[in-house]
Image (cartoon, rainbow, N blue to C red):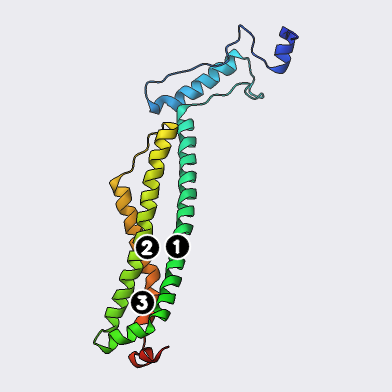
Amino acid sequence: MVPVTTAQKRLFGMPRPNMVSSITVKVKSEDLMSVAQEEVTLLLRQRHKITSFQDDDFTVRNMAQAMEAAQQSTKVMSLLLGSIASVSLLVGGIGIMNVMLVSVTERTREIGIRMAVGATSKDIMLQFLVESGMLSMTGGFAGVLFGTILSRILSGAFDWQTVVLPGSIALAFGFSALVGIVFGLYPAYKASLLNPIEALRYE
């Protein structure tokens, strides 16, 4: 291994044994952080003999900037995950709507029989809305169960602390029911508009 001389250290900016690589400054309150940063910058420029026309040969950072950067990263990740979840809900809702439309077509005679014995259009519409809501809530229950099991596995495998809140579970079920109802409105409305006589003749 070839030894590095002092001249080479100065040339390549490598720290020497008597060189201070970093300094940590503590302030009394967060309000004084910007003032302290300016004073430290001025003091270092004086000690380094840097003129007003020269750039700093050092970097001054504070924890507020680091916290702000971390918060920005968290916001970006939240927006990204929210976008992925929104697309997933949209795709799932379209799938539920297609399933319910097929169900309405296949059960046309059943709808006609129900109307013939006294069921109103509101009754038919409510029936299919309940079915679409139950279908989506079943998917929500499977998702909550899978997520809970996965969080336990990750906690045991990587020693991570994961918490499953009851409020988040209730929110997941609420969104599942809402998606089922919203995307089940059109199939339910279509079923409620069927003519009983034509529905009974449907093959």
Q: Position of residue 36 (x, y in %)?
A: 46, 22
Estimate how packed mark 3 is, as few (under 14), some (14 to 19) or many (20 or more) residues with alpha carbons within 10 Å.
Answer: many
Q: Which residue is mark 2?
A: 136
Q: Which residue is mark 3?
A: 188
In the rendered image, which quarter contains the N terminus? top right
* Relative to 1, residue 140 above or below: below
Say which mark, if any, is on residue 169: none
Q: Furthest-left residue in view? A: 118
Depth check: 41 or 108 in front? 108
Q: Who comes first in sequence, dot 2 or dot 1?
A: 1
Task: Tell me, yes or no, whether the two marked residues, 1 and 3, touch with CB atoms within 8 Å.
Answer: no
Q: Which residue is mark 1?
A: 92
In the rendered image, which quarter contains the C terminus? bottom left
Depth check: 203 or 42 in front? 203
What secondary structure is marked by label 2? helix
Residue at 36 percent across and 81 percent down: it is: 191
Residue at 64 percent across and 9 percent down: it is: 16
Spatial distance from mark 3 to mark 2, Cα to Cα? 15 Å
Three-letter amino acid code of the residue under disc 2: Ser
Depth check: 44 or 134 in front? 134
What secondary structure is marked by label 3? helix
Three-letter amino acid code of the residue under disc 1: Gly
Q: Who comes first in sequence, dot 3 or dot 2?
A: 2
The count of marks equals: 3
Residue 156 shows up from this direction: yes
Question: Is 52 situated left or right of 191 in this image?
Answer: right
